[in-house]
Amino acid sequence: MKGLTDVPGILVGHATDADALTGCTVVLCGNNAVGGVDVRGSATGSVELDALHPGHVAQNVHAIVLAGGSAFGLEASCGVRRILERRGIGFDTGVTHVPIVPGAILYDLAVAKAGVRPTREMGEKAVEAATADAVAEGNVGAGTGATVGKLFGMAQAMKSGVGSASLTLGSGVMVAALVVVNAVGDVIDPALNRIIAGARISANSREFIDSAAALRHADVQSQAFRGNTTLAVVATNARLDRVQTNKLAALASIGVTRTISPVNTMSDGDITFAISLGNETASVDSLGVAASEVLAMAVLRAVRAAKTAGGIPGLAG
């Protein structure tokens, strides 16, 4: 399993600053992909989401950018557009090709080196690194500074990162996902019905508080820093129109709600993108069931692949 790149035509590239603990991730999908989006969080930072809505004149999406750096990280998408224009990829205006490059950011400023954020040059570097090889996971790209379990502050949080997975339906249709998990909440393995990464009772403990239970029993909202986000991209080789692709994004988001708790809070900027690239046939409902499952798998992989960094413990050591 390669993850998101199991879908033919999808390339993924990371640009990672391991010293500064920030980075960006680019998903390239050529000239013929249809995109959709589902916004669940209330602390979002994004660009060109309107281009994914039904009725927009540009019918295709050419890349998706996920970046750290909070709003400063939106600059990375400019570098992606610049390279794709040079490659002749984008909406043909008759003068030049204008790449449609939606993007979203997560807040990693609390762990990243002061003043270092993803730039246009980092976006270009991610494009140049894009490949159909197995997706690198853990402390890479947009997940370099990602963390989870921050309801009680960074001292009790855990490291997270990038995760990716894929599934094949009985018909042979492929559905895959890539996610960057930077949630205020805890990550739960549904099969085990327990927290595997999240807020700990103290900086030196691996015992979990259970953030959702804490919220139910006490008003701790004032302690939750409003700088968190889970960003996901799901892709399929089934042919969908714009309305169907937006529905796929919404159904895929269920996978995030299954594995993160609390989720979609006022402190999270959760966004799920969807890409249809191919000519296979499948119902949106069957694709949606698979997409939610594969996205849940990717969330678990994101924390299990994360290594300790910046003094924040990760499950991968």
Image (tube, helix red, strand yellow):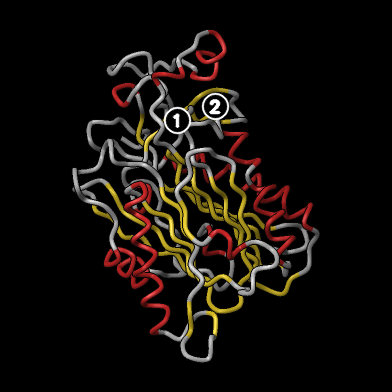
Q: Residue 150, how many percent across, how many down? A: 39, 26
Q: Residue at x 63, y 44 (%)?
A: 253
How many marks can you see? 2
Which secondary structure lies at badge 2? loop
Circle 1 sits on which residue? Answer: 184
Q: Residue at x 40, y 58 (%)?
A: 25
Q: Amino acid at mark 2?
A: Pro
Nearest the eye: 78 or 150: 78
Q: Residue 241, how many percent across, how many down? A: 73, 68
Mark number for residue 109?
none
* Screen quadrant of the C terminus: top left
Circle 2 sits on which residue? Answer: 262
Q: Residue 197, how many percent across, how many down? A: 44, 28
Quarter location, residue 130:
bottom left
Q: Residue at x 35, y 49 (%)?
A: 68
Q: Say above or below: 16 vs 259.
A: below
